[in-house]
Image (cartoon, rainbow, N blue to C red):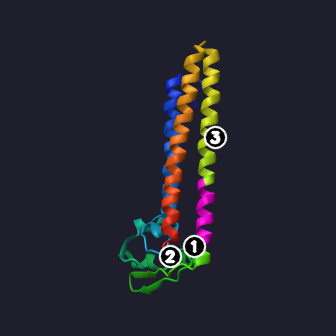
Amino acid sequence: MSEELSVEELCIDAEDRMDKTVSVFDQELSRIRTGRASAALVDTMRVSYFGAQTPINQLANVSVPDSSTILIQAWDPGAVEGIQKAIVQSELGINPSVDGNTIRLLIPPLTEQRRKELVRHTGKVAEEHRVSIRQIRKDANNLIKKAGKTENLPEDEIKKALSEIQQLTDERISRLNALLEKKEKEILEI
């Protein structure tokens, strides 16, 4: 961030960065297994394909025919082995079944212990993102105070900007907590 941004631009920048943090958290949650099949579990998984790390969704059609099955239909028969290897090496803990160009993943139901582990994991991920949002707030506050001194801004304008940053922080953490609560509920449902 440049020191030459106005207080208003600093607030807009902080808001944008906080929104991106919430968005990244939401994407991470979509990749956490809940006992139901979801294309998001494998979409961004990378496969070694002709020497390049390529996401599965660029090599195959990923579909979810039912709540416990993910179907991956490779466009190139040469990619099937790489896709299978990537799935086996991933943290999914699922053995793929290969039939020609089609890879089938049967999602087993989660055990109670695994559900609790996933809830703990999502809580840790949420806390990491809360810390990121708070760090953005801290950085923005410092820059606003610095800008206030260098530009001789009125004290009430600085307080208003700091208050706005705090409000943005509270809203984004609230949004993050709502996403976490929804995911935990999804994980714990049987």
The residue under the point 48% across, 76% down is 190
Does the magenta stretch mainly form a helix, a strand or a loop?
helix
- The residue to which callout 1 is attached is 115
Q: CA distance from mark 2 to mark 3?
A: 39 Å
- Which mark, residue 70? none
Residue at image x 48%, y 67%?
186
Between circles 2 and 3, the one closer to the viewer is 3
Q: x, y percentage for residue 99?
A: 40, 87
Question: In what element is the residue under mark 3?
Answer: helix
Q: Is residue 47 visible?
A: no
Q: Tell me which segment is drawn in magenta.
A: 115-126
Q: Is residue 87 above or below residue 43?
A: below
Question: Which residue in the structure is indicated by mark 2?
Answer: 82
Mark drawn on residue 135:
3
Q: Amino acid at mark 2?
A: Gly
Residue nearest the observer in this picture, 177 or 126 = 177
Cα separation between marks 1 and 3: 30 Å
Closest to the camera, between mark 2 and mark 1, is 1
- Depth-wise, is mark 1 or mark 3 nearer the camera? 1
Between 151 and 2, the one lying in front of the other is 151
Image quadrant where one finds the N terminus = top right
Residue at coordinates 51% horizontally, 33% vertically from top-left?
13
